[in-house]
């Protein structure tokens, strides 16, 4: 939940599309917003805890209750947000989007230059063709724009006009040049069509021409036609002619953009399928001041690592927002890997430049968000006089009941989020907490060669355990900072039992008794609580496993040697439970095998 709160607080005041996910990563909802910050926050109430806003409909209230994660894509305009929302809903079919899940898409206007006298037509389906040009898509006013072009320019008005051999009413109204009678050549017609396309691409020019026509109708006292044009102009004014996130070329593109500031870099990946942006992902990197940052190296590593396990490659080409020194080498490597020509392109203009700029826009927004998150890390560095801002933190805790089944846990917090893939748990062998923590930290230090040390250690404990951690680090030649967090001790046990004991921080600077709402204390509590949760989870698993082991040992004829043999052969208790009688008989004998199967049948254990 803390992760969701942080994402909500960092939302940009910019147009875009947002996506809600449940605890299993399932997409719940896709929405668009003129301001992501205002729109998304309106779904939630933040005090006293994060809950769905009370004014939501029952369906949306249920959706927000299920929401555990949030992602978003920033775009240049509200119109682009509308188009991207429509595309994502139709392709991903989220659980709570029910109105836009049909197969209809926003319409395009297109011109087929294979025709002798091409017309401007409307379609919802993009057809592959080398000599077909598309404009749009248009969330609204597509037909109004098309009708305006036919009213302003003497184009072929109907399909039937070409098939006929005699000029029709449109010629008499001066709205067609009668190519059916050969009154205009294809070359002359092409010049008129070019002018119409020019106005199709330039909304302001089109509106100016329509306003002149409206004035002409008014002067001729054709007020009904003038009013009709006025209404049409209003509709056209509200639409965006060009979109930066929807191409009518059916292309599959992977787009990469790298942006950096003095402290960090971000890699954004956009994925376009059949001309539509369908998803995005990002990765944040901490910049080492001494080593600096090499953007060319970042692009090279990003492409090589991303496509290492991608089989087959579905994108027709790869777009990068910046050129980089090894682009040709990477292109050749990927071509050999996938057995076909792969193009890694750095566009300077046109539609592909627009989509590269969209990826850069998202990268810049992520950097802005991280600057705000880094603020607390910089505050902690300054307040506790740390050597470095704690971008990567490891927190440790252990768990046991009266010394039984002791376990240790390490959680990792990096660049503003928990990195669960780097979590580790340890089975410990000592009974008292001091010895357990010593064993846990020593084992972590012994793995520094494989997994380098972080910027900061957080220990669940007081000054004694903090000093223990410092001594262990120094004995391994490592000098990272250590901060401990523990409950304040009271003489009256009841006072602590009621949950009134405050957390105290211990650092090299001394003891820190901070306000319960101090953001520094809240930061350490969040990480400590995650370490405690992870340690407790592993301890419960160990206890459950031991209880099953004890239960099996109670079966007559099964001793430790037999149990070890079973576990060595089957690996888990669940496999023992599902084992075949003949197989068991070969392993432990017929009599013991019969007892084991009878035991499972009788107790129906929920084994691990």
Image (spheres, rainbow, N blue to C red):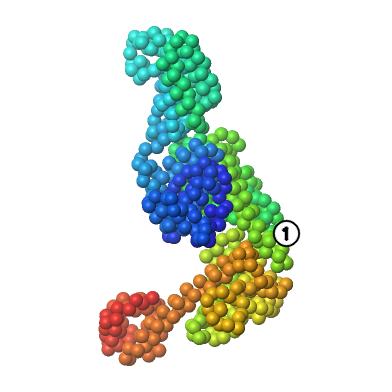
Give the labeled residue for mark 1. 290
* 469 versus 365 height, above or below: below
Name the residue located 40 percent from the left edge and 48 percent from the top edge: 92
Position of residue 359 measured from the top left corner of the image (x, y, whole percent): 56, 44
Q: Is residue 275 visible?
A: no
Position of residue 549 measured from the top left corner of the image (x, y, whole percent): 39, 84
Rendered image quadrant of residue 76 = top right
Name the residue located 39 percent from the left edge and 17 percent from the top edge: 157
Name the residue located 49 percent from the left edge and 75 percent from the top edge: 536
Position of residue 597 measured from the top left corner of the image (x, y, whole percent): 28, 82
User: How many dots with numbers?
Assistant: 1
* 239 or 185, nearer to the observer: 239
Rendered image quadrant of residue 489 = bottom right
Q: Is residue 236 visible?
A: yes
* 213 versus 529 height, above or below: above
Position of residue 566 measured from the top left corner of the image (x, y, whole percent): 37, 83
Q: SS of the residue at dot 1? A: loop
* 308 or 365, nearer to the observer: 365
Quadrant where the image shows the C terminus? bottom left
């Amino acid at each position: 939940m803390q992760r969701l709160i942080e994402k909500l607080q960092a939302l940009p005041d910019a147009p875009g599309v947002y996506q809600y996910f449940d605890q299993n990563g399932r997409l719940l909802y896709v929405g668009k917003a003129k301001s992501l910050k205002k729109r998304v926050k309106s779904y939630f109430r933040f005090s006293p805890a994060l809950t769905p806003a009370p004014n939501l409909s029952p369906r949306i209230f249920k959706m927000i209750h299920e929401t555990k994660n949030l992602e978003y894509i920033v775009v240049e305009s509200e119109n682009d947000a509308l188009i991207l929302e429509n595309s994502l809903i139709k392709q991903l079919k989220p659980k709570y989007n029910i109105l836009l899940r049909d197969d209809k898409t926003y319409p395009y206007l297109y011109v087929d230059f294979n025709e002798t006298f091409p017309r401007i037509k409307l379609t919802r389906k993009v057809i592959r063709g080398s000599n077909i040009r598309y404009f749009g898509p248009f969330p609204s006013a597509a037909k109004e724009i098309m009708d305006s072009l036919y009213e302003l320019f003497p184009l072929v008005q109907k399909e039937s006009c070409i098939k006929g051999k005699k000029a029709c009413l449109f010629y008499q109204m001066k709205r067609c040049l009668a190519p059916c009678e050969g009154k205009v050549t294809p070359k002359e017609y092409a010049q008129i069509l070019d002018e119409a396309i020019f106005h199709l691409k330039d909304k302001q020019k089109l509106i100016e021409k329509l306003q002149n026509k409206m004035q002409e109708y008014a002067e001729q006292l054709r007020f009904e036609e003038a009013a009709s044009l006025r209404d049409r102009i209003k509709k056209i004014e509200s639409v965006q002619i060009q979109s930066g996130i929807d191409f009518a070329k059916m292309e599959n593109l992977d787009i990469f953009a790298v942006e950096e500031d003095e402290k960090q870099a971000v890699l954004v990946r956009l994925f376009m399928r059949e001309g539509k942006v369908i998803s995005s992902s990002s990765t944040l990197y901490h910049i080492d001041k001494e080593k600096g940052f090499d953007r060319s190296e970042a692009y090279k590593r990003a492409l090589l690592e991303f496509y290492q396990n991608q089989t087959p490659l579905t994108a027709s080409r790869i777009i990068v927002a910046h050129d980089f020194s090894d682009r040709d080498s990477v292109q050749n490597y990927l071509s050999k890997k996938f057995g076909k020509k792969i193009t890694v392109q750095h566009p300077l203009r046109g539609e592909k430049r627009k989509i590269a700029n969209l990826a850069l826009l998202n990268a810049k927004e992520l950097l802005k968000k991280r600057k705000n998150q880094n603020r607390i890390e910089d505050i902690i560095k300054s307040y506790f006089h740390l050597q470095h801002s704690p971008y990567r933190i490891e927190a440790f805790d252990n768990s046991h009941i009266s010394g039984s089944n002791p376990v240790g846990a390490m959680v990792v917090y990096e660049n503003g989020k928990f990195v669960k893939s780097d979590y580790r748990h340890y089975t410990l062998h000592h009974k008292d907490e001091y010895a357990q923590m010593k064993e846990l930290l020593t084992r972590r230090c012994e793995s520094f060669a494989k997994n380098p040390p972080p910027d900061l250690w957080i220990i669940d404990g007081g000054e004694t355990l903090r000093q223990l951690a410092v001594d262990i680090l120094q004995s391994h030649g490592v000098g990272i900072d250590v901060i401990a967090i523990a409950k304040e001790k009271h003489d009256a046990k009841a006072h602590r039992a009621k949950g009134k004991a405050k957390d105290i921080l211990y650092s090299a600077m001394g003891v820190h008794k901070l306000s319960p709402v101090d953001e520094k204390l809240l930061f350490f509590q969040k990480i400590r609580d995650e370490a405690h949760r992870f340690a407790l989870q592993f301890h419960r698993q160990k206890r459950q496993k031991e209880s099953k082991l004890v239960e099996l040992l109670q079966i007559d004829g099964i001793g430790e040697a037999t149990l070890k043999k079973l576990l060595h052969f089957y690996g888990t208790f669940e496999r023992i439970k599902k084992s075949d009688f003949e197989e068991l008989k070969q392993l432990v004998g017929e009599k013991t095998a019969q007892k084991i199967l009878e035991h499972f049948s009788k107790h129906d254990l929920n084994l691990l």
